[in-house]
Image (spheres, helix red, strand yellow):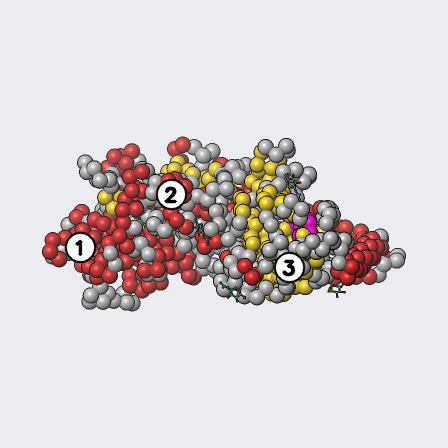
Amino acid sequence: MLARDAVLRFAVRLFIVIVVSSRSSSADDGGGGGGIDFIYQGFQHAANLTMDGSAKVLHGGALQLTNDSNRLVGHAFHAAPVRFLDDGAGGGGGGVVSSFSTAFVLDIVTVGSGGGHGLAFVVAPSITLPGASPEIYLGILGPHTNGNASDHVFAVEFDTVMDLEMNDTNGNHVGVDVNSLVSVVSEPVAYYAGDGSTKVPVQLESAQQILAWIDYDGGSSILNVTVAPATVTERPRRPLISTKLDLLPIFKENMYVGFSSATGKLASSHYILAWSFRTNGVARSIDLRRLPKVPRQSSPPPRLLIIKFAAVACAGTLTLIAAAMVAVLWLRRRAALADTLEEWELEHPQRIPYKELYKATKGFKESELLGAGGFGQVYRGVLRRRSGEAVAIKRISNGTRQGMREFVAEVASLGRMRHRNLVELRGWCKHDQDLLLVYEFMPGGSLDARLFGTAAAAAAAKAPPPPLLTWAQRFAILKGVAHGLLYLHEEWEHVVVHRDVKANNVLLGAGDTGAARLGDFGLARLYEHGATPATTRVAGTLGYMAPELTFTSRATTATDVFSFGALLLEVACGRRPIEPAAGEADGDVLLVRWVRDRALDGDGGGDVLRAVDPRLEGCYDEEEARLVLWLGLMCSQARPEARPSMRQVCRYLDGEEMLQEDATPAAIFSGADSSDLFGGSFVVSMTSSSAGGTMSASSLQGGR
Ligand SMILES: *[C@@H]1O[C@H](CO)[C@@H](O)[C@H](O)[C@H]1NC(C)=O
Ligand SMILES: *[C@@H]1O[C@H](CO)[C@@H](O)[C@H](O)[C@H]1NC(C)=O
Ligand SMILES: *[C@@H]1O[C@H](CO)[C@@H](O)[C@H](O)[C@H]1NC(C)=O
Ligand SMILES: *[C@@H]1O[C@H](CO)[C@@H](O)[C@H](O)[C@H]1NC(C)=O
Ligand SMILES: *[C@@H]1O[C@H](CO)[C@@H](O)[C@H](O)[C@H]1NC(C)=O
């Protein structure tokens, strides 16, 4: 039954392809009327595609343009050229661009932190795109060809990364590109529901099937682009983009249509599942029930395919039995995949049942509350079922299911990290709209509390105030945090940017011997990809945020280094990165500037050691203190390139590299003007506009 169906479908498709190609070739010969019309309902049979780079058709029939390896480029074009210009039968000179219409289903699967860069529907004069580069160029153009009118390239990009170089406005947009990746029109991905008055955002990088329609009317030069998740049953009536665009100067007589995709340091698997295209008419609609599947976490076991093949091969009497077998296997597989979230159960860290966490925290009782931060509340708990270990349970209320799913994938990946200077993630649990993360319990509390803890706070906690941290303890803490960050940046499977390095996120072990551990890594992504996909938010904490974050809103290892610089100074000086000035009108005191003033005070007679925490009463290692302050200033430089890497920082802290004789703070300042050091007045104006906490990029820009 199955076999006959497949053969029949194949025959029908072959017939269509033959008819279509003969019709289009006769159109080419005749020079008028006719056109091209094809539909690929999956690409395994009779797909006449020319592919290069990482593009390939998978067994199931999905066209994979890239997998999630870095810096790939994949192209797939319909092998036959499409005639796009009609000469105008009257011979009145000039030409007319043929109307065309295309519909396709795309699916972008991202595993781990942050995917990219996107895919595009492309119309180009040849199937080789000369100079095509990955990353921000999406494999369509390159640094030498971008923006050149002789490219004759038209594309509609589905971009999942915000590239400032391409004037992108967010990390999830559709753009119309003409000879350049700087889009002429671009919109955050969304569709208009119902009568067209409500706009519903769509997340490209969400591993869901997304339909896209591109329609061009040659007569009126109107281009429409419409997008909708495959779960939306009707094609939205109002297009997302509707723009006047004269393609006559762009198109040559014969062009190739297809897809291009690229990855960069950020990578996703990009798939096209079905594609229909037609000139001078509306593209045939795609049967969504017959879409090929794309591999999710792991590729399907090959044995299953072999069984399927064998079953199909020995048709006849065996067909029924085989069909039953396949059905059983298929049902079992579907059952196994049905709860996609539970896939993580197989991985570390395990999912912990909500009930257990509820019990551990006595029903999330107020008395068990350890603290509340930007991301949610933290409770103390004891997992009785699991050896009675004490844990800290962070409860994050999110509200968006899509972001959550991605985020859980990321959390599961982070949970495999093991480093003595990173707080260990023991497990997680998703419950309704909440995500619960279970961390090891750090009895020493946060570094922030130890540095600045007041007697009042101690009294409230019914505990004696913690003793002052000695210099040796501080230096060991800084070293530990540096190594934790180095691990995130360079030693883990992929680069993880912490995004929120600060004293509050440094947790201490019990007694004087416990190593300091960095917590909350990766959580800031939840904020950035959170509730409203249309606005990219920058997570971070004032005083620790590198100045470039306000323009790029992209966290990098260098922005982490900046934050670490602030931490170095904070720990050495016992002052917060930003302190409100006592009674001064000109705003708050920036620690970097304060340290600099101590170092350069007087007629060159300043000594940077005057910045060291006075509470230490001179009990500190002068050489170490000098090093910490110097490194703090180095890391706080405004230009990201000027900051050292975490590896360099660790080498200095470990004593593997010595300070040069002339490596004084003065040398840093004389090398660059002072505004270079910490973003100058820019940072100051930022601080006066807000009390602290997490801000959105737009509010920061508004403050400039
Ligand atoms: C991804 O594709 C590239 C290029 O086709 C290939 O070299 C690489 O092995 C693939 N990686 C995985 C994980 O499949
Ligand atoms: C695919 O396209 C090429 C180029 O136009 C053509 O030569 C070939 O016959 C086509 N194959 C099929 C199966 O349509
Ligand atoms: C545009 O491309 C053409 C052909 O490749 C080349 O001759 C020309 O120099 C390019 N123009 C610019 C401004 O790069
Ligand atoms: C990006 O936009 C700015 C302001 O609109 C404009 O000045 C700049 O030329 C654009 N960049 C590119 C590469 O088009
Ligand atoms: C584009 O969209 C507009 C507005 O919905 C519609 O009037 C027009 O017919 C559409 N054109 C094409 C070519 O689909």
Q: Which residue is mark 1?
A: 599
What kind of residue is marked 2? Gln
Residue furthest to the front in view is 92
Q: Look at 53% across and 49% down and name the residue there.
A: 184
The secondary element bearing badge 3 is classed as loop
Q: In the drawing, does residue 162 fall left or right of residue 323?
A: left
Q: In the drawing, does residue 448 fall left or right of residue 665?
A: right
Q: Which residue is mark 3?
A: 252
Counting residues from the start of the chain, the first of labels 1 and 2 encountered is 1
Q: In the drawing, does residue 206 fall left or right of residue 317?
A: left
Which sits in the foreground, 501 or 381? 501
Q: Look at 28% across and 51% down and name the residue there.
A: 678
C-alpha distance separating marks 3 and 2? 43 Å
Label 3 vs label 1, nearer the camera: 3
What kind of residue is marked 1? Ala
Q: Look at 47% across and 51% down and name the residue there.
A: 167
Can you say which quadrant of the picture contains the C terminus?
A: top left
Q: In the drawing, does residue 433 fall left or right of residue 619?
A: right
Q: Look at 69% across and 53% down and name the residue there.
A: 92
Counting residues from the start of the chain, the first of labels 3 and 2 encountered is 3
- Whether label 3 lies within 8 Å of ligand 3 gets the answer no
Examine the rendered structure and indicate whether residue 571 appears above or below residue 21: above
What kind of residue is marked 3? Lys
Tell me which segment is drawn in magenta: 97-105
Q: Which residue is mark 2?
A: 701
